Every structure is written in structure tokens, then in C-alpha cells.
């Protein structure tokens, strides 16, 4: 694990240069528009998978023998292939490929599968925080699946910080940002009640409040940008909050989101258990995913969520 001993700092965001979104009541809030989807490299060449494709009946053995995966990542990865897989979405004539993890993080959460990976991530987060000499004061968890993960993750951290739900299309608050849904083709309004951040500030008057974000998936990085912007709006209203880390069970590494976060948010460390390097559909052997630490592409199930958006 890489140590981040330098102070994490959020880049100043010029709200005047952001896009705007008008709510039904006429209120204008900042808007982070959808970015063009970055397809997996394997979707560009559907005839070649890295070092071939491991058949489904050999998949568990390939995961178990992988040298670059922790024991928690292996458990989580097996669950992803057993009850999830890949999904096609987007335009029918030009589909994108994503991850079907509904039955792993949203509809069905098994502590035996998830717990070890979260425990390992908590150890990394605590070690990193100690190296930087900071106290984790709270966890920001986007609705809905991020909340359950955030509560579980908090229980494993040394500081046992409270979890603040980042609401999606909830009641109006003073801190709101509009964001395009990456795969559903609609606009969501993300919000945090200012008074909840003020509760944390009251415990440390005049001091910096260090928050981490816990979500189920790290893809385009737009949710992280939205939360960083919400915290910037809070700072403008006198709450000294700072985003000091992002924790997710699964990450797509090919999207360039880490670089985008570094450029648009700052040097915020990102911790993930399973890293997806590539996905594709082989002409003969079907859909596959390539994980960091696994030498071969792993055959997977696929669901067609393709629709015009």
C-alpha cells in the first residue's frame, strides 16, 4: 500500500465556471454533466482476450491461485462472478460494457463475502491516516448502496466515525449538486444537509473536519467530484470540511478516473479491493473480465441492459 504522508488538499473549484441546473422550484445549483463513456479496451477488439479466457468451471481455481489478490479480494471476486457478471448498456448500435453487481452490493449483501475485503481496506485506510497524522471524522456514503457499506466500514475503522448519507433526489437542502447518471441517462440531485456537517464542526471548533467517501463502485469518478463540490459549498458557508480518501470494493482502472480526480479534486487517495482492468466479448468464448492480479481473462455471465439513453 502506498503511503500518502503529504497533506491531502482539495483544489479550489470556481463555481461560476460550472454548468448550472434549474430545479423545479427555480433554484439554480451546480451541475456536473455526463462524460463520454470510456469503453474497456477489450470492447475495441473482440477477438483477443489477455492470455486467453479461463473457462467458467476453472474460474474459482484461477482466482484462488492469483498472486496479486488479497484473501478478501478473492472472496469478493468469487461473489461477483457467482451472482453478477457483466452488463451491456447504452446505445443498441454502440453498446458499452459495465458490471452487474446488483446481487452483490444492493439486493444481497453477505458479510462473509464482503467483510474480509472491507477489513483489509479499513487497515489500509487506518495505516494511511496514521501516516498523515489525521483523524477520520466522518464517512460520506451516497444513497442507497453506499450507506450499508459505509456503516460496515465505519465499524472496522479505529476512529469509528459517524456515517452521513449523501441523499439522492431527497428533500431540498442548502447543499445540492446535479449529476448525470452514468448508465441510467437521467439527472440526479445529490445533497448533504449543512446542519449535519455543522454537528461535526461543533465537536472540533476551528479545526479541519476530515471526511472519507465510501461507495460501492468507482467508475467515472463523477460521484467523487460531486461530493468534493458539495464540501466546497459547505466551506463557503463556514464549515471547514475536507475529503481525505475514497474507499470502494470495486474499481474500473481503465477509465482514467484517478487522473481526473487528481486534476479536478486534488491528491485524494483511493482505496479499492478489486480492480477491473478490461472487459470484452470474445467471438467464440463469450464475455470475459480481466482483473488486476489475475493472469487470464475470466469468463462471465452477461445481461443485456442495452437501451437508448
Image (tube, rainbow, N blue to C red):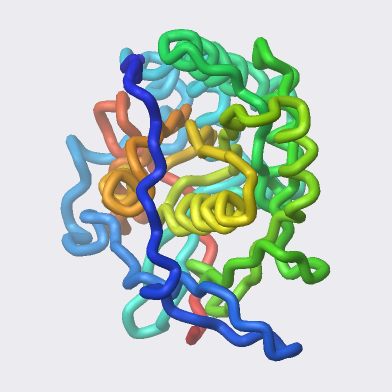
Measured as percent of width and height from the top left, residue 125 is found at 51, 19
Measured as percent of width and height from the top left, residue 1 is found at 35, 15
Picture residue at 66% right of the left edge, 34% below the top = 139
Picture residue at 79% right of the left edge, 38% below the top = 199
Residue 154 shown left or right of residue 31 in the figure: right
Residue 6 shown left or right of residue 25 in the figure: left
For the question of whether residue 176 can be seen, the reply is yes
For the question of whether residue 285 can be seen, the reply is no
* 154 in relation to 248, above or below: above
Picture residue at 34% right of the left edge, 16% below the top = 5
Q: Residue furthest front?
A: 206
Picture residue at 49% right of the left edge, 84% below the top = 309
Measured as percent of width and height from the top left, residue 142 is found at 66, 50
Could you say which quadrant of the image residue 299 lies in? top left
Residue situated in front as seen by the camera: 159 or 82: 159
* 126 in relation to 296, above or below: above
Residue 162 shown left or right of residue 97 in the figure: right
Amino acid at each position: 500500500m502506498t503511503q500518502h504522508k503529504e497533506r491531502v488538499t482539495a483544489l479550489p473549484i470556481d463555481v461560476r465556471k460550472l454548468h448550472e441546473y434549474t430545479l423545479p422550484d427555480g433554484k439554480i445549483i451546480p451541475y456536473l454533466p455526463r462524460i463520454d463513456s470510456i469503453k474497456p479496451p477489450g470492447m475495441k477488439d473482440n477477438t483477443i482476450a489477455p492470455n486467453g479466457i479461463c473457462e467458467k468451471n476453472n474460474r474459482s481455481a484461477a482466482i484462488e491461485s492469483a498472486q496479486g489478490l488479497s484473501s478478501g479480494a478473492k472472496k469478493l471476486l468469487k461473489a461477483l462472478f457467482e451472482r453478477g457478471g457483466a452488463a451491456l448498456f447504452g446505445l443498441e448500435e454502440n453498446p458499452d460494457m459495465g458490471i452487474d453487481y446488483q446481487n452483490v452490493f444492493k439486493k444481497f449483501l453477505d458479510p462473509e463475502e464482503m467483510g474480509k475485503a472491507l477489513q483489509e481496506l479499513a487497515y489500509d485506510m487506518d495505516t494511511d491516516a496514521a501516516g498523515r497524522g489525521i483523524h477520520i471524522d466522518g464517512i460520506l456514503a451516497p444513497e442507497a448502496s453506499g450507506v450499508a457499506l459505509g456503516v460496515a466500514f465505519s465499524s472496522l475503522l479505529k476512529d469509528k466515525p459517524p456515517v452521513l448519507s449523501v441523499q439522492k433526489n431527497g428533500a431540498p437542502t442548502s447543499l445540492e449538486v446535479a449529476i448525470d447518471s452514468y448508465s441510467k441517462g437521467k439527472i440526479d440531485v445529490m445533497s448533504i444537509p449543512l446542519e449535519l456537517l455543522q454537528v461535526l464542526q461543533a465537536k472540533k471548533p476551528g479545526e479541519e473536519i476530515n471526511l472519507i467517501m465510501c461507495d460501492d463502485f468507482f467508475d467515472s469518478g463523477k460521484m467523487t467530484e460531486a461530493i468534493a463540490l458539495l464540501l466546497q459549498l459547505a466551506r463557503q458557508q463556514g464549515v471547514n470540511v475536507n475529503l481525505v480518501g475514497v474507499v470502494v470494493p470495486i474499481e474500473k482502472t481503465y477509465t482514467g478516473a484517478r487522473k481526473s480526480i487528481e486534476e479536478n479534486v486534488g491528491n485524494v487517495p483511493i482505496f479499492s479491493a478489486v480492480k477491473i482492468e478490461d472487459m470484452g466479448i470474445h467471438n467464440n468464448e463469450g464475455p470475459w473480465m480481466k482483473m488486476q492480479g489475475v493472469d487470464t481473462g475470466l469468463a462471465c455471465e452477461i445481461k443485456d441492459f442495452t437501451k437508448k439513453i
